[in-house]
Image (spheres, helix red, strand yellow):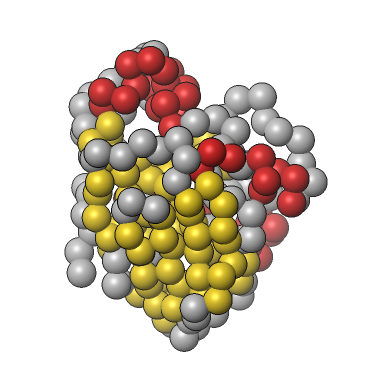
């Protein structure tokens, strides 16, 4: 299956759930922590997450994704909703061993296929309190709600737009709840968000 969006950039948010911050014993950030994933990391529902030979430890991170509808720069939080095309599921796949080696996030999160998104974009949705779960081989690993976000969707859009111009089709993935863990070749990983559906991908060599 093909991807459902064609962004100029994928903006990701680190450490954006209170329960995840508590889990990893980190202080809540004072402002959103942003980084970028390349568009070449994007795949769709049903496509394979490919583990490169140089990577030994691969983690899933289920997330809510926001799809941008209109060009925007320096947009206020109160106006941010009008530039949202809709919402979908995302999985911020991370090479954890590479992240430890590098001491930063770019390479570990940028491998091809490391950003599954899908299965569909839903426009008529309130993102403030949606159940978000991740299962690996049918076993629940993450179970939280978007109400636990430190910075809500509209705060994130406003903050990111202060840094860079948002363009139609751009994607913001909004951080992951607690329960992040390992996936291995042969596994099936599913990210499900209330009102959207289930993003399902297999892990392959």
How many marks overall?
0
Q: Quadrant of the N terminus?
A: bottom left
Residue 160, image x, y percentages: 43, 26
Res. 78 visible in picture: yes
Q: Quadrant of residue 100?
A: bottom right
Q: Is residue 161 left or right of residue 134?
A: left
Tell me residue 4's x, y (percent).
21, 54
Is 108 placed above or below 170 here? below
Residue 176 versus residue 154 in the image, above or below: below
- Which residue occupies 76% across, 41% down? 26
142 and 38: which is toward the camera: 142
Give the quarter of the figure containing the C terminus.
Answer: bottom left
Q: Residue at x 21, y 27 (%)?
A: 70
Image point 48% across, 54% down: which residue? 132
For the point 47% across and 85% down, which residue is it?
186
Q: Quadrant of residue 172?
A: top left
Is 155 left or right of 8, judged from the image as shown? right
Residue 135 at x, y percent in the picture = 50, 70
Can residue 112 be seen?
Answer: no
The reply, left or right, for residue 71 in relation to residue 113 is: left
Residue ranking furthest to the right: 25
Horizontal side of residue 42 vs 148, given as left or right: left
Nearest the camera: 13 or 141? 141
Residue 66 spot, x, y in % from top left = 35, 40
Q: Is residue 51 above or below residue 155?
A: below
Between 101 and 67, the one nearer to me in the picture: 67
Point out the residue furthest to the bottom here: 186
């Amino acid at each position: 299956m093909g991807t459902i969006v064609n962004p100029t950039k994928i903006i990701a948010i680190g450490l954006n759930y209170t329960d995840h911050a508590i889990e990893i014993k980190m202080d809540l950030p004072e402002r959103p922590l942003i980084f970028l994933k390349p568009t070449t990391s994007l795949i769709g529902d049903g496509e394979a997450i490919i583990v490169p030979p140089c990577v030994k430890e691969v983690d899933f991170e289920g997330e809510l994704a926001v799809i941008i509808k209109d060009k925007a720069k320096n947009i206020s939080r109160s106006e941010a909703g009008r530039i949202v095309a809709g919402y979908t599921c995302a999985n911020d796949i991370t090479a954890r061993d590479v992240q430890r080696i590098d001491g930063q996030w770019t390479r570990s999160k940028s491998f091809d296929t490391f950003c599954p998104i899908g299965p569909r974009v839903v426009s008529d949705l309130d993102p403030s309190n949606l159940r978000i779960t991740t299962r690996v081989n049918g076993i629940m690993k993450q179970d939280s709600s978007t109400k636990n976000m430190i910075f809500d969707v509209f705060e994130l859009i406003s903050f990111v737009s202060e840094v860079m111009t948002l363009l139609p089709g751009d994607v913001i993935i909004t951080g992951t709840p607690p329960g992040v863990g390992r996936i291995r070749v042969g596994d099936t990983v599913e990210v499900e968000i209330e009102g959207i559906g289930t993003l399902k991908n297999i892990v392959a060599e």
